[in-house]
Image (spheres, helix red, strand yellow):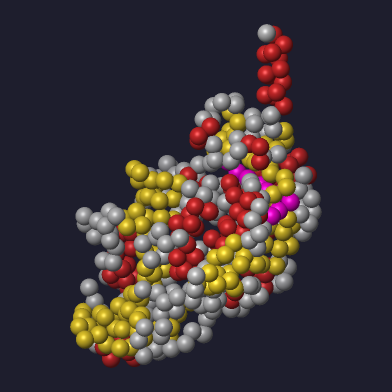
């Protein structure tokens, strides 16, 4: 299992039955592949659909039906399409139960930076600021480090995406929960120690009393 | 009786929208115009009007759109052809050409959170003086904006956006300009059709009045000035 799959599988355990979920582009998209058996999730995409499905059979793509990354998708029975105003009323208005987003950095208070590296990479925020502001739960799915540098930092050096703490951070090394008292280390990946995780983390981590092996 | 029928038909015909070629539509978009273009990564973007704007070498346009798609797709073709001076969009990550031109100071890029962009356009078309949104509070988006506290929570005052022209893509239109969109090709099209002085729609098909049931119409034809003919 590679790191991306490990992260996606762990995030998928956070999915709840009958919930409305928005997955960001990239790694978060993989979470849809690991929905636990017996759970029905309504996936929303900010370009205006609830209930999109996997890629259509080759040659049967509809040019009017893509995900937010522009990839062709299908639609499941019960799917519903809507315009961008409705899509972001759902997002900003607290109707999305969970969003899973990639991250560049998360700080000790749980604030996320994921939309710009000034002067180097300027993709823009797309829907990320609205999602972090309005979704009920925000899970950051990302690698623990970037070229050996910790991505979980004491203080953000990149512009924040929102003025709000995310709900959970899932990396290939650990599961970390932001709280009013800082970051709490909940789970550690198999084969790693608490010290390994702390060494790869810039921010101070409080080890939960019941810290466990990563599910 | 006969004259009554004639009157009915005349009234009905007078409600028809003007149909124009894409080339004629491109002439209705002057250089320097402020233009809204529907679409999300090129899905639901009026491709024939864009090609005609590129062909007529439009210049100095200010575009309001969700994104600039990819260099060879949709709005990306306008960027690549040098038609655009400024964009107001939510992301440019899929178009390296937009990023390169921004860095070279050939193109001004204003990035706006996607939900804020939708609401600013809605405000522009709905006669509102702006919207209060929590999105962007505590980020660089807050810079230079009024922060308004309501019931203990901070919001940014975001001002309305309007355009000279909106270029809309629809799945179907009827002769009166009533529009229906398909699936995720709807996106910004309906809200933009409310927020411009001139609204030009490029439908995939044009059907007789009455074929589109009133309850299924997404954009009322009264908002649409011109239809691109088949």
| Along the viewing direction, whichever of A53 and B214 lies nearer the viewer | B214
On the rendered structure, is B208 left or right of B106? left
Where are the magenta residues, as a range?
B162-170
Q: Residue furthest front?
A: B151
| Along the viewing direction, whichever of B35 and B50 lies nearer the viewer | B35
Q: Position of residue B53 (x, y in %)?
A: 73, 48
Query: Residue A127, relative to residue B12: is it above or below?
Result: below
Q: Residue furthest top?
A: B1
Q: Position of residue A185 (x, y in %)?
A: 29, 83
Question: What residue sits 67% from the left and 39% below the top?
Answer: B224
Question: What residue sits 45% from the left and 69% below the top?
Answer: A132
User: Is B152 one of the magenta-colored residues?
Assistant: no
Q: Please name the predominant secondary structure of the magenta segment in the image.
A: strand
Is residue A76 visible from the viewing direction of this image?
yes
| Along the viewing direction, whichever of B200 and B118 lies nearer the viewer | B118
User: Is B165 one of the magenta-colored residues?
Assistant: yes
Question: What residue sits 79% from the left and 50% below the top?
Answer: B30
Question: What residue sits 66% from the left and 41% below the top?
Answer: B223
On the rendered structure, is B77 left or right of B180? right
**The N terminus of chain A appears in which quarter of the rendering?**
bottom left
**The C terminus of chain A appears in which quarter of the rendering?**
bottom left
Query: Residue B51, relative to residue A202: is it above or below?
Result: above
On the rendered structure, is A36 left or right of A121? left
Which image quadrant for residue A196? bottom left
Which image quadrant for residue B3? top right
């Amino acid at each position: 299992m590679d790191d991306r799959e490990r992260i996606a599988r762990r995030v998928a355990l956070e999915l709840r039955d009958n919930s409305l979920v928005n997955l960001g582009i990239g790694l978060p998209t993989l979470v849809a592949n690991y929905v636990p058996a017996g759970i029905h999730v309504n996936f929303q995409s900010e370009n205006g659909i609830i209930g999109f499905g996997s890629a259509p059979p080759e040659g049967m793509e509809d040019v009017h039906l893509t995900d937010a990354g522009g990839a062709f998708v299908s639609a499941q029975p019960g799917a519903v399409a809507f315009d961008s105003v409705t899509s972001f009323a759902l997002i900003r208005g607290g109707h999305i139960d969970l969003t899973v987003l990639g991250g560049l950095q998360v700080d000790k208070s749980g604030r996320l930076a994921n939309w710009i590296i000034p002067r180097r990479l300027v993709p823009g925020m797309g829907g990320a600021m609205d999602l972090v502001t309005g979704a009920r739960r925000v899970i950051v799915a990302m690698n623990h480090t970037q070229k050996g540098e910790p991505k979980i930092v004491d203080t953000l050096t990149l512009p924040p995406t929102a003025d709000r703490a995310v709900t959970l951070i899932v990396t290939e090394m650990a599961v970390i929960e932001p709280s009013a008292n800082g970051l709490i280390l909940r789970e550690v990946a198999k084969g790693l120690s608490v010290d390994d995780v702390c060494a790869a983390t810039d921010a101070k981590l409080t080890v939960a009393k019941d810290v466990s092996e990563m599910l | 009786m006969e004259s009554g029928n004639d009157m009915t038909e005349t009234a009905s015909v007078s409600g028809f929208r003007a149909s124009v070629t894409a080339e004629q539509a491109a002439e209705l978009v002057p250089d320097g115009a402020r233009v809204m273009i529907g679409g999300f990564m090129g899905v639901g973007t009026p491709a024939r009007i864009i090609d005609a704007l590129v062909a007529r070498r439009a210049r100095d346009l200010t575009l309001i759109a969700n994104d600039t798609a990819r260099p060879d797709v949709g709005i990306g073709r306008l960027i690549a052809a040098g038609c655009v001076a400024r964009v107001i969009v939510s992301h440019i990550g899929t178009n390296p050409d937009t990023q390169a031109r921004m860095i070279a100071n050939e193109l001004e890029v204003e990035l706006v959170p996607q939900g804020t962009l939708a609401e600013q356009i809605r405000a522009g078309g709905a006669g509102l003086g702006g919207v209060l949104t929590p999105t962007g509070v505590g980020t660089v988006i807050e810079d230079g904006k009024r922060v308004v506290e309501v019931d203990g929570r901070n919001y940014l005052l975001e001002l309305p956006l309007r355009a000279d022209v909106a270029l809309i893509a629809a799945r179907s239109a009827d002769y009166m300009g009533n529009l229906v969109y398909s699936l995720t090709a709807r996106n910004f099209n309906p809200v933009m059709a409310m927020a411009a002085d001139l609204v030009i729609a490029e439908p995939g098909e044009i059907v007789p009045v009455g074929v589109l049931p009133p309850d299924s119409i997404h954009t009322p034809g009264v908002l649409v000035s011109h239809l691109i003919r088949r």
